[in-house]
Image (cartoon, rainbow, N blue to C red):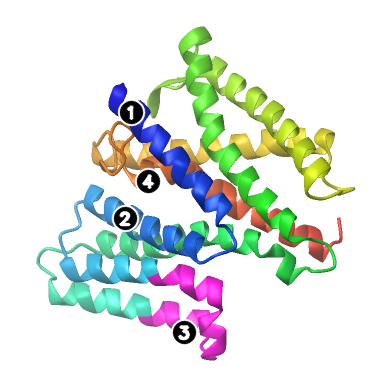
Amino acid sequence: MKVRVITGIIGILVIISAVVFIQTAYLGILISAFSMIAVYEVLKTAQVKNKGIILFGVLFAAAVPSFVEYNLLEKLRLPYSSVITVFGILMLIMMLAQYDSTRFEHVALAFFSSLAIPFSLSTLILLRDVYIKYPDRFEKAHGIYFVVLVLLCSWLTDTFAYFTGVKFGRHKLCPKISPKKTVEGAVGGIILTAALNSIVLIGFNKLAFKSEFLTWWAIIPISIFLSIISMLGDLSASTLKRNYGVKDFGKFFPGHGGVMDRFDSLLFVSPTVYAAVAVSQVYML
């Protein structure tokens, strides 16, 4: 428990530093590093032994946040589809190089995780810079708020659910996937996160921006929806671990597991928030 608490405190400090320096390259560097580690953890969990596939997957995951943050492909006039296609071909070539120890499912998993994980995490950068893409609707503070909203819904839902479940948990939520999760814990996590999100939004509205479409009463159903998405992300990662018979993806965070164990919910919540923001601009909601 002591190690878990110390790791948690360090993690909180890292997250706070990311928010404080959110307008610098620091956020992109963190996302690149976590993307690399997360992809590596997934491939090791799946027992991928082809070093070429692992190397290409990890390096591609590290590069994606830079593509997103600095629009490198657009500056080089390279379409994403071409880059992804070439990446897939390289993966298949690596399979041929070690065909005796590589199954196609390893290539498929490596290809998917090397794309999905860094692109999902990179939506935090897109949310931060939403005021650049939609200057008529958003300010810098909106971008910071969206990132904070993602972090709160991703991590506090699970934290509140854990403590609520320990105290009041009686009915198992998904016993075959995650035996320790309870219905009572899930409900408690959703309610407490929604309450905290309302308070945080009130603070932003008073100190940073005045928004007609971001109100404390509107954020409650949004928070509930995002908390549910967060739980689905957590359960999806748990399913993957069950498939390969492991408890944790890694040991990067002592007492908490690997990067994927901590970021599984965020991989679902961040793209959802960005998609909602983008759609709202298309239809001017």
- Report how far apart the C-alphas of labels 2 and 3 lie in the structure: 25 Å
Which residue sits at x=52%, y=36%? 155
Structural crowding at the residue carrying mark 1, measured as other residues with C-alpha within 10 Å and reported as few (<14), some (14–19) or many (≥20): few
On the image, numbered disc 2 is attached to which residue? 37
Q: Is residue 172 visible?
A: no
Which residue sits at x=53%, y=8%? 168
On the image, numbered disc 4 is attached to which residue? 260
Q: Is residue 57 visible?
A: yes
Residue at disc 3, secondary structure: helix
Residue at disc 2, secondary structure: helix
| Mark 3–mark 4 CB contact (< 8 Å) | no
* Whole-percent x, y for residue 242 in the image: 31, 36
The magenta segment: 63-86
Front of the two marks 2 and 1? 1
**Magenta run includes residue 71:** yes
- Report how far apart the C-alphas of labels 3 and 1 lie in the structure: 43 Å
